[in-house]
Amino acid sequence: MKIFGKDKSEEKKLDSVAIIMDGNGRWAKARGLDRTMGHKAGAKIVQGILEHLRDLGIHHVTLYAFSTENWKRPKREVDMLMELFYQYLDTVVLKIVKEDESFCMRIIGDKQRLSEKLRNKCIEIEELSAGRPFICNLALNYGGRDDIVNAANSAINDGHTELTEEILSRYIYTSSSPDPDLVIRTGGDFRISNFLLWQIAYSEFIVLDTLWPDLTNEDIDRCIEHFYKRNRRFGGLDPEETNKA
Ligand code: FPP
């Protein structure tokens, strides 16, 4: 059965997943620990989840690590997070990109507000891993509204006088990845928190009560099972309905 030039299996393809990693603070509080310990625990599970998604045949994963609004948190927590991101990139990610030629990391968001040390590490990782087939977009100082405004300004600076969806899509931070098929949010809150506003127009959304540091591969499997049960119509009708009309 064809719909908009795609057959049913293609319509259901799951190749791009985005994750809002929420709940680190509550995970720490429940254990009588400082919030920063929750972020450390959260960092420990990132690699395993990425590897699991890749083993499932997914090629694009976008992780929300720090938003343009997260600077409002206490300075101590922000400083700790920035150091954690630096250490993570400098140790775990650098090792992966050196050993695994399929892994590409792109850091999406406005790098200008990051420290020079962190910005340079982001650029080093991006340069080392460019052009590889499994892409992890790590959102650092990322805002969906900022992404759209930045894309529009970049397009205008390149001489475009009238924007189209196709042109703008070429300038957004995730231009190397298809729009997410599935967005997963841990931590139980039903909101999008300024994440990928342009890209999620037709993404499926799953919210898990599980706090990010507790997330397991089995939770991911259950999300994917749910995804395949969803009826994605992209604003159209089911093929049977279209044929009847
Ligand atoms: C939201 O939880 C989480 C963050 C703002 C930071 C995300 C960071 C990590 C998952 C760990 C580090 C990641 C990498 C890639 C090294 P929250 O603090 O808002 O939790 P809460 O809602 O329970 O307070």
Image (spheres, helix red, strand yellow):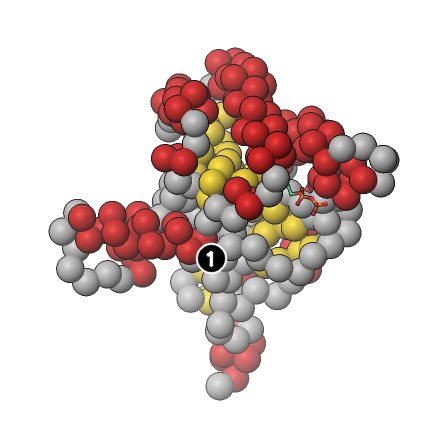
Along the horizontal axis of the image, is 82 left or right of 37? left
Q: Position of residue 86 (x, y in %)?
A: 52, 23
The residue nearer to you, when weighing 98 against 20, is 20
| Ligand 1 placement by image quarter | top right
Residue 63 in which image quadrant: top right
Q: Position of residue 37 (x, y in %)?
A: 73, 29
- Label 1: which secondary element: loop
Q: How many marks?
A: 1
Let me know if residue 173 appears in the view.
Answer: yes
Q: Residue at x 69, y 28 (%)?
A: 40
- The answer to whether the beta carbon of the residue marked 1 is less than 8 Å from any atom of ligand 1 is no
The residue nearer to you, when weighing 17 against 152, is 152
Q: Is residue 148 above or below residue 130?
A: below
Q: Residue at x 33, y 54 (%)?
A: 149
Along the horizontal axis of the image, is 15 left or right of 156? right
Q: Residue at x 42, y 41 (%)?
A: 109
Q: Position of residue 18 (x, y in %)?
A: 56, 46
Q: Identify residue type, mark 1.
A: Leu
Q: Is residue 207 above or below residue 113?
A: below
Q: Residue at x 55, y 80 (%)?
A: 241
Q: Which residue is mark 1?
A: 197
Let me know if residue 180 appears in the view.
Answer: no
